[in-house]
Amino acid sequence: MITQPNESSEYRVAREALLQQEIALRAKVEEVAAMRLSLPKGGALRENYQFHDLDGASVALSDLFQPDSDTLAIYSFMFNPTAENACPACTSVMDGLNGQADQIAQKISFAVVSSKDNASLATLCADRGWDKLRMFSAVGTSYQRDYRGETADGAQLPMLNVFERSGDTITHFWSSEIFFAGLDGHPRHVDQIWPLWNMLDYTRGGRGEFFPDVSG
């Protein structure tokens, strides 16, 4: 058993009880991860969607797979086509991921897709300093609708989808479907890629009602 300087016996008893739950949680997380890894092959890609990069050039979804990578994760970034500003939550997620984009690319391919036009996305990336993220416009495609990044009436949804490539075949592997599970409170469906909340969870104040200011 470890102890911290000047702690009380009451604290240590409570901390040891919490530690056991943390150990159980870790085991459960690894159990869920193993189930995810053992998923059967998902459905074939509905179509080879033609996105547009920040310069307006057409880029097929199949071309988002980087060389030597057969896994592609795509985050659906909420930025309504008629809105002036992007979703602040998605913006916070991207602020964090931009710093690790190069490291993510060492293992898998990662891209960000939005229903906003490419010129607006280019301006946003420049303003936020997102120089590592690969961001694309899905305007003119049904990708967002097909893979739950947009509702039938055009409302934007923050979804993470993962695709696999085997030869010339691309299949869907996983998506953050817990978003639609009807849970109380925020579904926390992409918390694993959003380190802000994980840091705050280690503090007494926790998350509370806090939300980061991304206006700067």
Image (tube, rainbow, N blue to C red):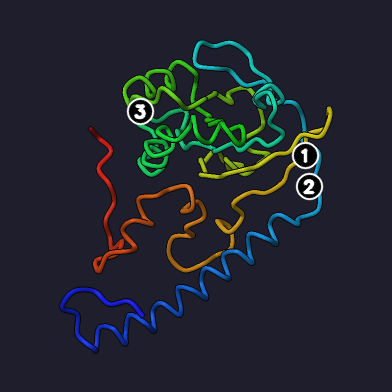
Kindly identify which numbered label has been placed on residue 171: 1
Which is more N-terminal, label 1 or label 3?
3
Q: Position of residue 166 (x, y in %)?
A: 81, 34
Cα distance, mark 1 to mark 2? 6 Å
Check the image and report above or below for 4 versus 100: below
Left or right: residue 47 compared with residue 184: right
Could you tell me which secondary element the residue under label 1 belongs to? strand
Could you tell me which secondary element the residue under label 2 belongs to? loop
Kindly identify which numbered label has been placed on residue 84: 3
Could you tell me which secondary element the residue under label 3 belongs to? loop
Cα distance, mark 3 to mark 2? 36 Å
How packed mark 2 is, by other alpha carbons closer than 10 Å (few <14, some 14-19, many 20 or more), is few
Q: Position of residue 205 (x, y in %)?
A: 24, 66
Of the residues shown, which amino acid type is indicated by label 3? Glu
Which residue is at 25% across, 69% downward? 204
Of the residues shown, which amino acid type is indicated by label 1? Thr
The residue nearer to you, when weighing 208 against 134, is 134
Cα distance, mark 3 to mark 1? 34 Å
Q: Position of residue 22 (x, y in %)?
A: 45, 73
Mark 2 — residue? 42
Check the image and report above or below for 61 versus 56: below
Q: Nearer the viewer, mark 3 or mark 1?
A: 1
Kindly identify which numbered label has been placed on residue 186: none
The residue nearer to you, when weighing 182 against 48, is 48
Please identify the quarter of the rendering in which residue 96 is found: top left
Q: Assess whether mark 2 and mark 1 are in contact (beta carbons under 8 angstroms).
A: yes
